Amino acid sequence: MKDKVIIVTGGSSGIGLACAEAFGKRGATVVITGRNEKRLQEAADGLKAKNIRIHIIEADAASEADNKRMVEETVSRFGKIDVLINNAGISMRALFEDLQLDVFRQVMDINFYGTVYATKYALPYLLESRGSVVGISSINGYRGTPARTAYTASKYAMQGFLEALRTEVMKRGVHVLTACPGFTASNIRNAALTANGNRQGESPRDEGKMMTAEEVAEEILKATQKRKRDLVLTTEGKLAVFLNKWVPGLMDNIVYNKMAKEKDSPFK
């Protein structure tokens, strides 16, 4: 990664920030984006203290114009793009019957269209550098979970898009990685949207028992270096993917029962 230029969308916290640190420690120049300038600056200050070359761009992943500007500013300043990490994302938790459609659209705009916009504008430069497109997806990209319909739809869409894109560019030197972390300790559940679009505020799961964002970032770094096609993390995640392929009916019941036991579950 020495002297590579990396873009990480949604890089001010969680897996995105951990990726910025992991790639930056290996000698990369890292560009991180986010909607909150204060949080971006705090993240940048922390990375600079670790001698990581960092540049911040305030940008909304759901905005096509912001994604175009992100790419243009990166190329203008650094001359190239070697790796694009599509990390910006948001979750939700509500039964579909209660979910406002504006919330569904918001999740799709950030998680799916954010990936499409960033990749569209970065692709010409990634073709030049024979670089990597990384999509931070989820086990939900393989197996839907109840009360997370919009999140599941966004991850299935992301994975289908990246699979098709991979096949388009595989003879032209561009690497496409779909990374599915499984449950990871981060702020994504705290910031998850409820039925009316308000933030959940408190995670319904025990964050202390999950894989850390730093561990996930190291796995993503290694998979990028090895130019792997897919990355599925945690034993539970791998088992879910396997069982959903071979015994999907059984998985319906397993997943329902697991989600129903969550704190403040919407299932009554």
Image (cartoon, grey):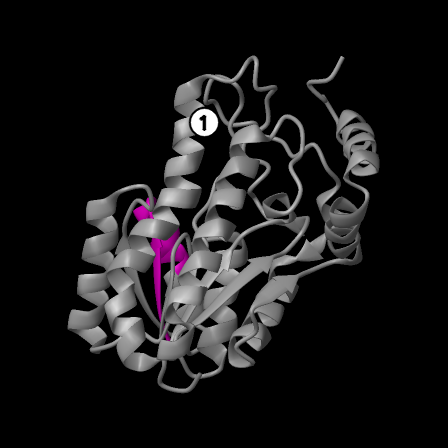
Q: In the rendered image of this protein, does residue 184 appear above or below residue 27?
A: above
Q: Is residue 120 visible?
A: yes
Range of magenta residues: 29-43
Kindly identify the residue that appears in the image at 49 percent across and 79 percent down: 25
Where does the image place residue 242, in percent across and percent down from the top left?
Answer: 77, 53
The relative height of residue 230 versus residue 106 in the rendered view (above or below) is below
Q: Which residue is mark 1?
A: 104
The image quadrant of residue 52 is bottom left
- The quadrant of the rendering that contains the N terminus is bottom left
Residue at 65%, 35% in the rendered image:
203
Q: Amino acid at mark 1?
A: Phe
In this picture, residue 218 sits left or right of residue 130: right
Q: Residue 140 at x, y = what percent?
A: 62, 43
Of 217 and 142, the residue lying toward us = 142
Q: Secondary structure at mark 1?
A: helix
How many discs mark residues in the rendered view? 1
Is any part of residue 45 visible from this angle? no
